[in-house]
Amino acid sequence: VTGLGGKAAIVGAGQTEFSKEAGRSETRLANEAILAALADAGLAVADVDGLVSYTIDPVEETELARGLGIPEIRWSSRVPYGGGGSQGVLLHAAAAVAAGAADTVVAYRAVKARSGNRFGAARSGVASSSSHSGTTAGQWAAPYGVLTPASWMSLNATRYMHQFGVTNEDFGRAVVQLRGYAATNPNARFFGRPITLDDHQASRWIAEPAIRLFDCCQETDGAVAFIITSSERGAATRAPVTIAAAGGAALLEQEIATDHYSADLSLMDSSAALARQLFDRGDIKRSDIDLAMIYDAFSPILFMQLEGLGFCGYGEAKDFIADGALGPDGALPCNTNGGLIGEGYIHGLNLTLEAVRQLRGDAANQLSQVRTALVSASRTGVILSR
Amino acid sequence: VTAIDERVPLLRPAPAVTEDNLFYWEAARDGRLVAQRCASCGKLRHPPRTGCPYCQSLDFEIAELSGDGEIYSYSLLWHPRSPRFSYPVIAILVDLAEGVRVVSNLVGSEPADVRIGLPVRVEFDPCDGGLAVPVFRARAATA
């Protein structure tokens, strides 16, 4: 293992409830999730000396530190690229710990994507150039009514479908599996609500021919937090999970949820680059992965990442999934919490939370023998192990 | 909630105009489709940016484009809906003849007629702020 591999561990994980209306501020949600994560780790607020979140997270570090009572922050950072950058908080935290810039880092995301600023709303009045969101949609897409992440992404997905003969029904087979996992996960927004392929095909079009309503993640209120420290310090905690590899691969022309300008949009080049970071530089092989948690803001990007990461060939995800690969007994159990589509959308960090739970053996849909888990958010990712 | 007066047709929202993309939107306002051409290596690029991604030169010229291209991908956008557009919005990616790609809309066609590979030609549609945006209309395959 080269680079950061194995030097840092997740020693605590916490969350708030996931809901449609939290009824309290994002700062309060972050505060609650971080306290839960510290309790899980058996560490105190005074142990924390580092903070990392997303550039678009609304929580101010100063307010958060006040509410928690963190006496001294030695290091802090934020990661761009929205949910695609979600696993970057672990890359940053592991790097800070490995470098000695901080001893104990809190990585968090708090969001009111349902009751606050809905990610899927058609906000044509706002045409900002960036606002640290890493996208130029306001300049190049909003004047054309291409206003939402689903609409940005669907342009890539249609090309993918055209290139490889994929249908929305193919996407539906993955969604049925995700909703099946969610149905037995009490933490999921869709707990107790499995669907059939017919249900999926009857859901209304959001962006035809790629994305129906049931292909979309659930805008959600809530927060998730992790405590990261060195593997040595982590060894003294209850249930440390090693960050075996962490990588980022933000390629030229990519924006949040979009890349409209690369030559071939049917291939998710960022996932292929991420896989090189995670697999080619260390000693972990694809065949070692017992669980894959893959950023499924919309079902097509689950397919494109599976292919880019090399778990199947380009154009083969539809057959891989139709063969049951993503199920609990499949070739690559995937998004066992229901994913962002079934459990909820804490902007990708709830996928990491599920990986930690599976590795510790306390997930709602617990698999047997989970030793190594991959979390991929297309351009950032981690491999976790126990 | 803002009341929408349905008697007044709403224009498209204006693009976010920046110091680095001003030339593009000024040209569009004047009915011209343009792109940056590197003054050093001669390569075209879009969307506009401060330097050449191929040779790092900061010098560029503004190249006039033919306005002809073909649809690289598309999407019929049904939900959510903005009062500024009629639905479904026909969103398209156009590969222009000169080799750059733009996000746009297909106008003058039924949603069922949009397809990858459809030859299209630019025209211009007004938007807020006294500006206009390039949009595309199907052209006869033999043209």
Image (cartoon, coloured by chain):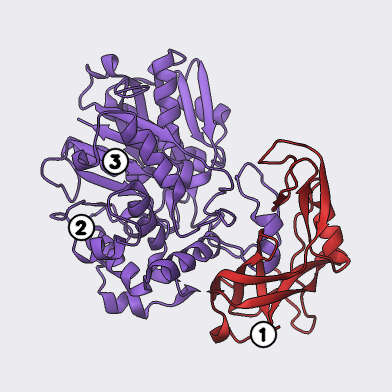
Chain colours: A purple, B red
Nearer to me, B119 or A184: B119
Where residue A233 appears, as percent x and y from the top left, is 28, 15
Looking at numbered disc 2 in the image, what kind of residue is underneath it? Ala
* Mark 3 belongs to chain: A
Task: Name the residue beneath numbered marker 3.
Answer: A374
Task: Name the residue beneath numbered marker 2.
Answer: A325
Q: Residue at x 39, y 24 (%)?
A: A94
Q: In the figure, B10 relative to A331: above or below?
A: below
Do circles 3 and 2 both sit on a common chain? Answer: yes
Q: Residue at x 24, y 60 (%)?
A: A320
Q: Which marked residue is nearer to the observer: mark 2 or mark 1?
A: 1
Where residue B142 appears, as percent x and y from the top left, is 67, 85
Where residue A303 appears, as percent x and y from the top left, is 35, 59
Nearer to me, B136 or B15: B136
Q: Secondary structure at mark 2?
A: loop
Label 2: how many Cα within 10 Å (few below 14, some 14–19, many 20+): some
